[in-house]
Amino acid sequence: MFEAFDALILARVQFAFTVSFHIIFPAFSIGLASYLAVLEAMWLATGREVYINLFNYWLKIFAIAFGMGVVSGIVMSYQFGTNWSVFSDKTGPVLGPLMAYEVLTAFFLEAGFLGVMLFGLNRVGPKLHFFATLMVAIGTLMSAFWILSANSWMHTPAGFAVNDAGQFVATDWWALIFNPSFPYRLLHMVLAAYLTTALVVGAVGAYHLLRDQLRTGPRVMFSMAMWMIALVAPLQIIAGDAHGLNTLEHQPAKVMAMEGHFQSHPDGAPLILFGLPDQDAAVVRYALQIPKLSSLILKHDLDAPLAGLDTVPRENWPPVPIVFWSFRVMVTIGMLMLALGLASLWLRWRGQLFSARWLHRSALLMGPAGFVAVLAGWITTETGRQPFTVFGLLRTADSVSPLAAPAVGSSLIAFIIVYFAVFIAGTVYILRLMAEPPHHGEQGPRGDLPERAAGITPAPAIASRRLG
């Protein structure tokens, strides 16, 4: 049934599908791990029971999200060998060590302390347990560090040479790891993870406040989430602007696609708010635009010239409509986050943070917005890199494995079926946990099961242990 399809297109669809499922879980678990560390620190500092109740409440949700993130990430690694073997061969000497560093540092740190974090509060004591929680939070940030370093190198390659076999090899690991776009992309992603988590926590708190405004747990989590959104949303806008300027320097075609600038503007470029990009005709139809504002944003000068896609060979154009609209989705959600944060500050000042039901409904509606913004941001940056896997050096069409379309298509169908079955079930379970409010004496994940590992343990032995 896939004979009429292109194997390259199917391989790209498969990777896009799996990475879209995967990215939402790290985006949530990175922020949630840090939130758990803050909750436990507040409990140790103040002794208030509400903080440990919230810690145990969100710890169960973190365990499920973390597990689904790990499982979906492993699948992506296999695709490098199955669908993108040429890419793996050529970039392996550079990206292989970076991925190994992520496993040897971040993943080992997370795996080493995760069990203590989940089950060890009553076994190792509060201070050692807090140390384990802190290590897991640091591990998630280190994981983001290495993954984004590898991904950023594909956008702004540096510190490398090409050997006789056509492979990229490192010549300067410092320049390679801290490539030109890496600091901006790392900051942008970490802030996005914190905002995503804050929106989810705020939505859960708002849901329970709509049902009962006097519950202490929802009040505390909602207040903390609104503080985070109010503080981080402006920082994210500033970081996004700096990231955009860096992208303009190193990947100008991506910015041209984001802005919808098919034509160059020698006397100041307009900011196109909305329109319908027509890539074949190289024009944005029905454009609603503000004159010269794009030049002001990108060059800080109303009359600054901006080059358009007419200066780039057409075979090197990214898919403009996708990049154009995904960028606007991300920016629009960012503005809504800022508005939510400012509204919470105003109502907090007026003493109405826990009584303004319209704010609670708004926060509830914004709960999934962080995930949508993260997906839109990744679509913008990854689609904007096309038609290259390593920008300017290795084309996507030259990176794919020599596979027939039916082989890729059949595995794509299998992924779709399994992913929707497993991850929808996990998401439904998380939503069921969120539907119940945190309560007095909230317990974390149970550590007393299973009674034994796989294998046969004689029943008398079990009974003797219980009696003894």
Image (cartoon, grey):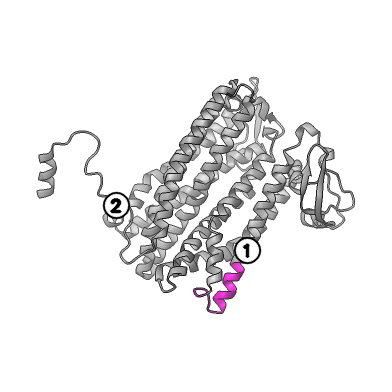
Which of the two residues, 16 or 127, is positioned nearer the viewer here? 16
Which x, y percent locates residue 269? 84, 52
Which x, y percent locates residue 430? 42, 52
What amino acid does circle 2 point to?
Answer: Arg
Which x, y percent locates residue 71? 44, 39
**Residue denoted by label 1:** 338
Q: Secondary structure at mark 2?
A: loop
Where residue 337 sits, quadrant-wise, is: bottom right
Please check the rendered image and state whether residue 224 is part of the magenta-colored stretch, yes or no: no
| Residue at x 13% of width, y 48% of height | 466
Which of the two residues, 312 or 183, is positioned nearer the viewer here? 312
Residue 175 seen from this side: no
Residue 339 in the image: above or below residue 418: below
| Residue at x 65% of width, y 55% of height | 239
What amino acid does circle 1 point to?
Answer: Leu
Q: What mark, if any, has residue 246 been given in the picture?
A: none
295 left or right of 37 in image: right
Which of the two residues, 426 or 314, is positioned nearer the viewer here? 426
Residue 374 in the image: above or below residue 228: above
**Residue denoted by label 2:** 446
Residues in magenta?
341-355
| Residue at x 54% of width, y 75% of height | 348
Pick out the residue farthest to the front.
Answer: 1
